[in-house]
Amino acid sequence: MHPTTQLLENARERVTFPVGELTKLLYVNDEIYETFMKAQKIIANEPTIRNHPDYHNWSRKQQIIKSYEKLRIMHQHFNLANAVHWAPLLSIFQGTTPTAVSFAMTVPALRFLGTDEQFNLWGPKFLTMEIVAAYAQTEIGHGSDVQNLETTATYDPQSNDFVLHTPAVSAVKFWPGELGFLSNYALVYAKLIFNGKNKGVHPFMVQIRDNSTHKPLRGVTVGDIGPKLGYTTKDNGYLAFDNYRIPLNSMLARYVRIENGQFSRHGNEKISYASMMVSRQLIIFIYPRMAAQALTVAIRYSITRQQFTNDKREENSVIEYQTQQDKLLPRLATCYGMIFAGIRIMQLVDDNFHRVQKKDFSTLQQSHAILSAVKAFSSQWVVDTTEWCRLSCGGHGYAHYSGIPAVYFDTAPNVTLEGENQVMYLQVSRYLLKVLQYAEKTPEKVPFYFTFVLHIKETLANKDLNTSLGHWLKLTLTIQLIQVGKRIKDLMNTGKTFQQIWNEHVGIHLLSLAQRYAEYFIYLVFQEYIANANPSVKEILQQLCDLYCVQTILDNPNTLIESGQITQEQLKSFNELKIELFAKIKPQAIGLVEAFNFNDNALRTCIGCHDGKPYEYIYDWATKENSVNKVPQAVIDLMGTKIKAKL
Ligand SMILES: Cc1cc2nc3c(=O)[nH]c(=O)nc-3n(C[C@H](O)[C@H](O)[C@H](O)COP(=O)(O)OP(=O)(O)OC[C@H]3O[C@@H](n4cnc5c(N)ncnc54)[C@H](O)[C@@H]3O)c2cc1C
């Protein structure tokens, strides 16, 4: 057997748990798993869309053309109305997926905020691509602060329609995906001006390009915003209106209406959160799986990569070095927790979705808070983890051929889009403070994943050294919540306004608090999974969860130290436990990444393939697949000319 293949095979033989049992947990149900496997196979076997080693040498235009080929194939094989069917493609294909914004952002908004008639009018046209619609909210001057958007939709009582207008450069819509050249419609968020009064920001379904020529309609300026950090195939765009008339029916009218010249509101406006939840939950569900790709590459490579000799004069696989384990194993452990949290959140959002449709808003705020916390936490974690995976592969990790830089590029925007992370965290902390008040006044209102606020005294008093590791996460969260609550109260007594305190005095504490909540939520879900898992994988899952907790405590011990809740001895014991867990998890690492079941093409790698021959594939790709080696004529001409250099 090839020597590096042998190294991987030896590692596989040391795995002691049934890998397939974990695969079942990671993919929720047979439908999701089979769709994912089918997607991997289709992409690998279809020459036009197969992930290509030379992809990163291509021009942006070439990459975009390939992504449209993908769209055609997607239409043949997947049910685009069902996110479960197309979502797997987001993680295993080179470049972003055209129409993902249209389906994941615009369609849910239409379903939640439009009337049934409006949904029936436009909804079916998405499936045939008669309509592809960008979600056009952000403007050059405002993104996070939606209420201050400047685009106006002025109601004209004479013609019973709206005039859509961009009053300044800062009001130009900027960044919406698929706006640059794909969309013929846009869901435009604009300030409704009715009888001269601002009635708030509302969504309008607007045709922007001609149905047959695809050219911008008169009064519409639209195009692509230009190159970005990665994300090459997504046509993020700009859009401006010059007194552009749109029909009355353009305004999504489930909650606000203009009828017989009268403006009225209906139901609960918080509903708009519910539509954002659909796309945010996809970020949590999909992208930690891309970190799992980077981890698969890094762990396989770390087993096959050998540097320096050991006592027996044999070369060491780099995975044997403790520092290499420190780069990868805690992240592998967290990856499991993150993926379980993503699945649980999908279930919470689904449940909330059904309630909201029946006008039951009881779970809306808590689902929004959990979703926001984990969206922010997981999106940053994916980027950080990918960077560590790259570093763990040394020089070869820096090459696109490793497959890792592309994961970084494709996931980096998630920190900003769909709610900028820090802004999300602040919303979470606002909710946590509210839940703290519930605990004091109306404990029956405290939702399930927040019940830690009902046990504050017991948590602070618990001095049991054998307590679960999760206790320390709960304790840190509890202390930070109490401290922030008290800090705000004390500052209010000095005469400062709440807004002043929030913006200028407690921001970093609020941020930390929300992060601690995300960590604790992931722990709770991890525990649920362990409790319900097949006995054959309980032990490995518990080890992963323990490593996740220990690393989390060691990353942020300040709160526990400052409050005197932890002794130096305890902290030391966590460091020792971490090293013990490394020894237990390292031999299982190959099984843990292969439970994800990515094929080589989906990993887009030459250093982390299943048969582990990194050097042959690296050399092969560099020499045979690298189009730059067809030396451009300009270089040949230049080198053929004698230049008189001044030395
Ligand atoms: C790749 C990509 C795709 C996108 N796709 C779409 C799309 O399809 N449709 C769409 O409408 N938009 C889209 N956007 C825009 C995106 O939603 C916004 O960029 C995002 O919401 C952040 O808003 P912003 O750019 O205004 O950042 P800002 O809010 O200006 O943030 C700048 C900084 O200010 C800080 N900050 C802002 N407010 C506060 C506060 N209250 N307290 C403390 N700190 C604060 C932030 O933390 C950040 O550090 C996309 C963006 C990207 C990068």
Image: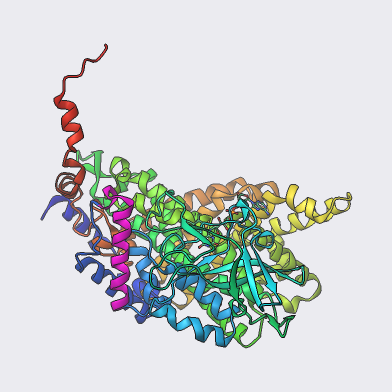
Q: Which residues are magenta?
A: 55-77
Q: Which residue lies at the image location 61% right of the left edge and 70% below the top edge?
A: 368
Looking at the image, is 171 positioned above or below residue 400?
A: below
Q: How is the image coloured?
A: rainbow
Residue 274 visible to the viewer: yes
Q: Quadrant of the C terminus?
A: top left
| Residue 129 sits above or below residue 229 on the image | below
Q: Quadrant of ligand 1?
A: bottom right
Q: Is residue 477 left or right of residue 402?
A: right
Most foreground residue, 164 or 89: 164
Give residue 589's position: percent from left, percent from top. 33, 58
Counting labels gives 0
Q: Quadrant of residue 24?
A: bottom left
Q: Residue at x 30, y 64 (%)?
A: 594
Residue drawn at (32%, 65%) of the image: 68
* Residue furthest front in the image: 158
Counting from the top left corner in percent of width and height, residue 308 is at 25, 37
Q: Is residue 60 magenta?
A: yes
Determine if residue 302 is in view: no
Magenta span main SS:
helix
Q: Quadrant of residue 622?
A: top left
Q: Position of residue 30 (x, y in %)?
A: 35, 81
| Residue at the farthest left position | 1
The location of residue 113, given as percent across then percent down, is 60, 78
Q: Image quadrant for the N terminus?
A: bottom left
| Residue at the outermost top position | 647
Left or right: residue 283 versus residue 71 is right
